[in-house]
Structure formats: structure tokens, C-alpha cells
Image (cartoon, helix red, strand yellow):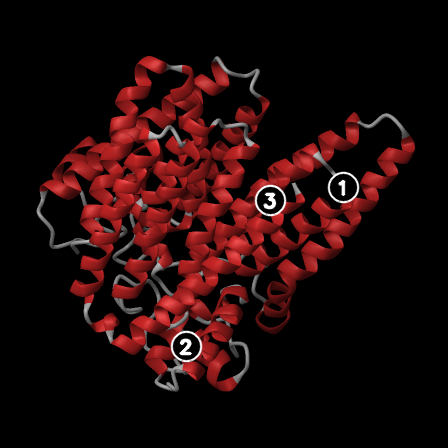
């Protein structure tokens, strides 16, 4: 077990080094201004990976097949990061100037002035960990490349997002194993997580979403490990993960509700006073580590600017993004079939139906693309079918498969996080509140539940397998063409 954990750490370090080295090579060769070359290389590599996958399947090496899927997912993430400039399909980046109040200005304050934002105006209120670590990576990369241009100082921060998105695949693999998935089930689950386009998009941006998702996945993984083995090591690791996660994005703390319930259950299941005392001590240590680490910046902003601890920047209700005039049922629970059929893409100024927006934005973000129309349509069709299958899988888990404790916990995590996103949209009724970039964590629980359902229903498995592969293939084709 120790060797496996050490191997996972080495793999993560290797992924970070690979992303940084490939990014620097692309800058040295000018590939960031030659997207056609990068996309062509991606296409060739994906064909090679597909051939290797087929070979692994023919030799009945499911483990090897899963590795090929993971490598393919990383190729798509890294390739997209390289050919996409930091100001393309960006969110809240704004002017690349040290005095701006977007992600770029936040980073440049750290890189050029070596200080945290002097106010909490607009994006300057954001938790600092992503910006701190990204500024370190940017300083290192641009020192090696002998570059001081503000644009490239900001652009290099993409490497942290990309590395986090790639490492999330490694974490998902461990999470699938921890939930008791067998090799073929892991393959199905990995297909969904490796090639869902939202991971390319968040992994190619300057912003904290990819890193926050990685920490949430790690928190879920170590919650499961702690549940099985509540020792000091897992307690401290879990506390550090939550601290860093909340220091990246406050919403990372949402899944701590499930962790807290497991903590309480473990406490009440102990009959001896000594065991309860040890557990209570662990919980105290957990809080001592995680709370200051996660909330120090929020406390700073509260003292300096009277900013609430759970503050989220709110758009004006007079904004063109406001959609609160539509009913709660229309926005949160209905399925806008007309919108689904009219266009595969979202319209952040007009769309209001959350379920449809979630599906569309998980594939295309809030953008349109110059590709043959049938590709996004097929991609959306596959995603709709898989979303329906996930819904069925959740109902099946709750109604028919309650004996599977791991499955129950995953379903609880899914419903908690999805419910939180609906609550967020209810509180902030604006089009941008529905973007799937805020909820990439939920893909892992969805993949686990779907793969468990497929394993228990052989008649449905073949059809769903075709749909999974259809989404993966359309995803790769589209993002090698845009």
C-alpha cells in the first residue's frame, strides 16, 4: 500500500513536470501561435493511443486499456492548454495589467509587487492559493524563458490549471478503486472523466476552478480512506487537503458536510470512552489545521473590508445576465426541451434552465465554435443520454442498491453537491451561475454511479458503452478542430 501511495505521488510530480516542460517547449518553438500544428500533433497522438487501447483490449489487459484512456485525457488537456491563449475563452481575466481587478491583475500584483490585493473589489476577493502557487510557477517558467512581458506572466499560470486537471484523473482512478469498482467498471468511469470537455476548458484557463476540483476529489478520496482507517495520518492529510481546498475556493468546503457526518457516525459507533476521547482529539487537531489554513484570508478580508466569510461576488439584478424573472420551477427543475433542440450551445444572456445549461456548458462552456454542426449535435446527444442514465443510476442506487454502502455515500455526495449548485443559482439568479465550470467535481460521483449501474444491468451496458465512446470520440474530434 505504501509503495502504491508513493507511486501516486511520483506520478503527480511527473505530471506537473510534464505540463511545465511541454508549456516551455511550446513557448520556445512558438507553438502557442501555431494552433494548427498543435492540434495536428494531438490528433496523431490520439490515433496512436487509440491503436494502443485496441491492442490492450485484444490482449485482455484492462489495466493497460485504462492507462491509455487516462493518457488520452491528458493529451487533450495539455494540447488544449498549449493552443489556447490565456485570453481566449477566458472568464474574469480582464485587462492584463497590474492595476486591473480580474484574475490577471491579481496574479500580477503577486508577481510584480509581491503583495496580496489591496482591496476586495470584483475578482480581488477570491481565495489566494491558486494565485499564490500560479505566481510561483509563472516566475519560475518566465525566469527560465527570460521573459518579463505581463501577458506571458499571466499566461504561464495556465500550467497550474492544466496540471490540476490532469492530476484529477489520477485521483479519480484512486477514488474509483476506493469505491470498489472492478477493472471494467473503472474503464467506463474513466471514459467519462477523461474526455468530458469541461476538463479541457478549465485546465486551459487562468482561474481557480480546476485546482479547487482537484482538492475536492482528494477530500472525497481521503474521506473514504479515513472512514476505513481513521488514523492520525489520514486525519492530518484530510485536514491539509480541506485547508488548501478552501484556501483555493470557499465552495470547496461544501463536501465537508459528508465528512462531518462520517466523523459523527464514527464517534457514536465507539462504545469505549478512551476510543471516543482519541477521536475527539483527532477532530480538534483536524480543526486546528484545516480552519486557519482555509479561512485566514477570509478573516483578513473581514477585518480589512468587512467582507462576510462566505462572500461571493454578486451581479446586479439590472444586469443583462439576470434571469430571476423566470419561476423557480422553470429555472431549477424543468427541462427546457425547446432550448435543448434549438442549439447545442448556451446563451448566457437568455438561457435560464439549469439542467439544460449544465449539460451544454459541460461540453462547450459559454461559447460557440466554428466546427461542422453535426459534431456538437452528436456530442450533446451523447451527453443528454448519459445525463439521463446517471439520473436512473441514482434512483436505482437509492431504491434498489442500498446494500452498497460505498454507492450510498457517493449518491449522497452527488445529491449534496448538485443541491448546493441549485441553491447557488437560486441565490444568484444570473446566467453565469449555471456554468458547469463550478461543478466539475460532480463528474466523478456521476461516473461511479453510472459504472455501478452498468455493471448491474448487462442489457443496458452495451448501449451505454457506445454512448460513452460516442461522447469521447466526438469530444476529441471537436477539440482537435476548433
Q: Residue at x 25, y 71 (%)?
A: 32
Neighbour tally class for label 1: few under 14, some 14-19, many 20 plus, Cα within 10 Å: some
Residue identifier under label 2: 105
Labelled pair 3, 1 in contact (Cβ < 8 Å): no
Judge whether 422 appears above or below 13 on screen.
above
Label 1, secondary structure: give it: loop
Mark 2 or 1: in front is 1
> Label 3 vs label 1: CA separation?
18 Å
Could you tell me if residue 33 is visible in this image? yes
Location of the N terminus by quadrant is top right
Residue for badge 3:
4
Instruction: Locate residue 150: give its quadrant.
Output: bottom left
Q: Nearer the viewer, mark 3 or mark 1?
A: 3
The image quarter containing residue 425 is: top left
User: Mark 3 packing: few (<14 Cα in 10 Å), some, or many (20+)?
Assistant: few
| Residue picked out by circle 1 | 231
Instruction: Judge by depth and name the residue closer to the eye, 182 or 83.
Output: 182
Q: Earlier in the sequence, mark 3 or mark 1?
A: 3
Eye-nearest disc, 3 or 2 = 3
Where residue 447 sits: x, y (%)? 41, 33
Amino acid at each position: 500500500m505504501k509503495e502504491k501511495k508513493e507511486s501516486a505521488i511520483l506520478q503527480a510530480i511527473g505530471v506537473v513536470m510534464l505540463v511545465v516542460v511541454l508549456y516551455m517547449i511550446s513557448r520556445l518553438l512558438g507553438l502557442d501561435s501555431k494552433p494548427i500544428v498543435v492540434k495536428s500533433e494531438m490528433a496523431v497522438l490520439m490515433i496512436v493511443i487509440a491503436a494502443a487501447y485496441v491492442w490492450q483490449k485484444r490482449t485482455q489487459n484492462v489495466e493497460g486499456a485504462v492507462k491509455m484512456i487516462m493518457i488520452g485525457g491528458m493529451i487533450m488537456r495539455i494540447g488544449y492548454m498549449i493552443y489556447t491563449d490565456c485570453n481566449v475563452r477566458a472568464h474574469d481575466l480582464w485587462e492584463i495589467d497590474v492595476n486591473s481587478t480580474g484574475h490577471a491583475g491579481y496574479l500580477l500584483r503577486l508577481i510584480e509587487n509581491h503583495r496580496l490585493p489591496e482591496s476586495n473589489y470584483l475578482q480581488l476577493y477570491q481565495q489566494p492559493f491558486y494565485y499564490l502557487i500560479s505566481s510561483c510557477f509563472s516566475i519560475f517558467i518566465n525566469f527560465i524563458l527570460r521573459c518579463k512581458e505581463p501577458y506571458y506572466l499571466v499566461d504561464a499560470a495556465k500550467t497550474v490549471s492544466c496540471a490540476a486537471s490532469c492530476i484529477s484523473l489520477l485521483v479519480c482512478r484512486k477514488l474509483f478503486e476506493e469505491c470498489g469498482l472492478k477493472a471494467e467498471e473503472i474503464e467506463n468511469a474513466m471514459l467519462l472523466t477523461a474526455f468530458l470537455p469541461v476538463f479541457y476548458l478549465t485546465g486551459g484557463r487562468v482561474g481557480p476552478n480546476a485546482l479547487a476540483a482537484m482538492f475536492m476529489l482528494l477530500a472525497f478520496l481521503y474521506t473514504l480512506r479515513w472512514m476505513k482507517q481513521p488514523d492520525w495520518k489520514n486525519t492530518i492529510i484530510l485536514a491539509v487537503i480541506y485547508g488548501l481546498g478552501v484556501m483555493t475556493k470557499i465552495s470547496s468546503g461544501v463536501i465537508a458536510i459528508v465528512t462531518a457526518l462520517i466523523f459523527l457516525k464514527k464517534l457514536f459507533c465507539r462504545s469505549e470512552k478512551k476510543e471516543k476521547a482519541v477521536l475527539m482529539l483527532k477532530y480538534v487537531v483536524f480543526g486546528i489545521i484545516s480552519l486557519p489554513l482555509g479561512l485566514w484570508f477570509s478573516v483578513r478580508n473581514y477585518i480589512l473590508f468587512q467582507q462576510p466569510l462566505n462572500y461571493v461576488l454578486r451581479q446586479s439584478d439590472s444586469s443583462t445576465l439576470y434571469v430571476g424573472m423566470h419561476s423557480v420551477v422553470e429555472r431549477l427543475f424543468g427541462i427546457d426541451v425547446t432550448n435543448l433542440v434549438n442549439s447545442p450551445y448556451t446563451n448566457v444572456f437568455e438561457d435560464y434552465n439549469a439542467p439544460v445549461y449544465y449539460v451544454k456548458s459541460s461540453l462547450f462552456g459559454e461559447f460557440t465554435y466554428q466546427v461542422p454542426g453535426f459534431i456538437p449535435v452528436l456530442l450533446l446527444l451523447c451527453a443528454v443520454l448519459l445525463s439521463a442514465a446517471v439520473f436512473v443510476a441514482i434512483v436505482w442506487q437509492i431504491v434498489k442498491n442500498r446494500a452498497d454502502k460505498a454507492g450510498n455515500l457517493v449518491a449522497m455526495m452527488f445529491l449534496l453537491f448538485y443541491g448546493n449548485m441549485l441553491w447557488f443559482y437560486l441565490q444568484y439568479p444570473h446566467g453565469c451561475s449555471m456554468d458547469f465550470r463550478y461543478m466539475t467535481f460532480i463528474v466523478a460521483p456521476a461516473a461511479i454511479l453510472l459504472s455501478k449501474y452498468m455493471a448491474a444491468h448487462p442489457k443496458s451496458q452495451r448501449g451505454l458503452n457506445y454512448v460513452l465512446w460516442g461522447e469521447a470520440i466526438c469530444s476529441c474530434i471537436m477539440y482537435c478542430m476548433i
